[in-house]
Structure formats: C-alpha cells, structure tokens
Amino acid sequence: MLLFRPSYSLLCSYFLFLCPKNDKLEALNIKLTKLDKDIASSEAKIMKLDDLIAENKILQARLAKLKEQLPEEKEVSVLLKQISELGLTSGLEIRLWKPQNKKTEPSGLYVEIPVKVEVLAEYHKLGDFFSHISRLPRLVNISDIKLITDAKSSKGKVGSGLINATFTARTFASASQQDIAAAQGNQGK
C-alpha cells in the first residue's frame, strides 16, 4: 500500500509562498468589502443630490426674502426716517426721537438698533401708527409702551383723548464684519 506523504519541501513551499498570499488575499477582500460599502454610500448620496439642489434653491429664495426684512445698517437711517414720517402722517406730535446705542446679538447675526420715542396723540391715531408700522416690509418691534393721559394738553376738557405715549422702536440690521468682531470680543470678556 502506498501512502501519499508530502515532502518537506512541498510543505515548506506552502508555508513560505502560499500562506502569506492567503493573508494578503484576505486583507484585500476586507478592503474590497469596505470599498463596496463606500461606493454604495456614495451612490445613495448621489441619488439625493438632485433633491438637495432643489432644496438649496428654495432656501436661497427664502433667504433673499428674509434679507429684505433685515436691511444693511446703511439702509436703517432710511427706515427710521420712514417710521418718523409715518408718525407725522398718522397725526402724532413727536416730542422725542432719540436713537440709542446699537447692540450686536451675541451670535453676530444681526444688530439691534433701538430708538426711544415719545409722542402726543389721540389713542386711535397712535393705533393707526402702530398698524402702519406692522405693515412695513422691514422688521420693527415696538416695546416698553407707556401710555399716560396728558392733562396739560387737554386744557381742562374731560375726555379730550390725548395721550402721551413713550415706547422703544427696535429695528434690526445685518451685522457688519466689525460688529461680528466686537460681539466675539465681548463674549471673550
């Protein structure tokens, strides 16, 4: 009976040449599997690309509309003049119009520009003025409203309807690079 006995040279050549190739082959298979997963992931992203481009266009259009409400700082003086003219056309007697220091929002996205205002007007005319402000395309917030009947201007007439109103009109502007740097400097302190 003849048994097959591998020779030592055959075994040595197997371990010297073929085993390292098996390890290399296994490493290449792992790398191939990883590349297949990367390709599948990239193909899924490519399929979403058209949707993302369309969504980007929608968001760009929305951003343009929102920028209309948030003027650049150089445009704010025109807006404040427009608000003052609205007060005059609404029948308000403007007693005080005092711009305050601007405040940069901590994230640096916008600058708040408050204006202290004091007016003398009839109640309904003041409401008409606030109504006109609400219809402006720009953002203007009215806060800190105080209404006091003005006994001096009523000249003894009961129910004259004149009130002295004080409030703060706040408008907003997109922040300049200087404003952003100042806000970041204030956050560090």
Image (cartoon, helix red, strand yellow):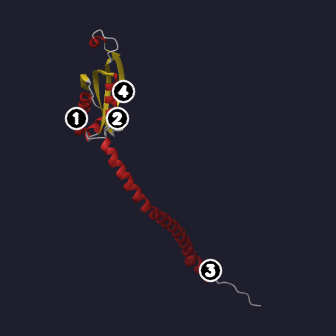
Q: Say the numbered circle drawn on residue 134.
A: 2
> In percent of the image, x 69 and y 85: which residue is there?
5
To which residue does mark 1 refer? 77
Q: From the viewer's perspective, is 90 left or right of 58? A: left
Quarter the N terminus occupies: bottom right
Q: Secondary structure at mark 1?
A: helix
Residue 85 position within the rendered picture, expressed as x and y whole percent measured from the top left: 23, 31
Q: Residues within 10 Å of mark 3 (few under 14, many from 20)?
A: few
Residue 55 position within the rendered picture, expressed as x and y whole percent measured from the top left: 41, 56
Task: Measure the C-alpha gap from mark 3 to mark 4.
Answer: 91 Å
Task: Measure the C-alpha gap from mark 2 to mark 4.
Answer: 13 Å
Residue type at mark 4?
A: Ser
Task: Measure the C-alpha gap from mark 4 to mark 1.
Answer: 20 Å
Which quarter of the figure has residue 130?
Answer: top left
Residue 102 position within the rendered picture, expressed as x and y whole percent measured from the top left: 28, 31
> In percent of the image, x 47 and y 66: which residue is there?
43
Q: Residues within 10 Å of mark 1 (few under 14, many from 20)?
A: few
Task: Measure the C-alpha gap from mark 1 to mark 2.
Answer: 18 Å
To which residue does mark 3 refer? 11
Q: Earlier in the sequence, mark 3 or mark 1?
A: 3
Q: Earlier in the sequence, mark 3 or mark 2?
A: 3
Q: Earlier in the sequence, mark 2 or mark 4?
A: 2
Q: Earlier in the sequence, mark 4 or mark 1?
A: 1
| Residue occupying the far bottom of the picture | 1
- 103 versus 65 height, above or below: above
Q: Secondary structure at mark 3?
A: helix
- Residue 189 visible in the picture: no
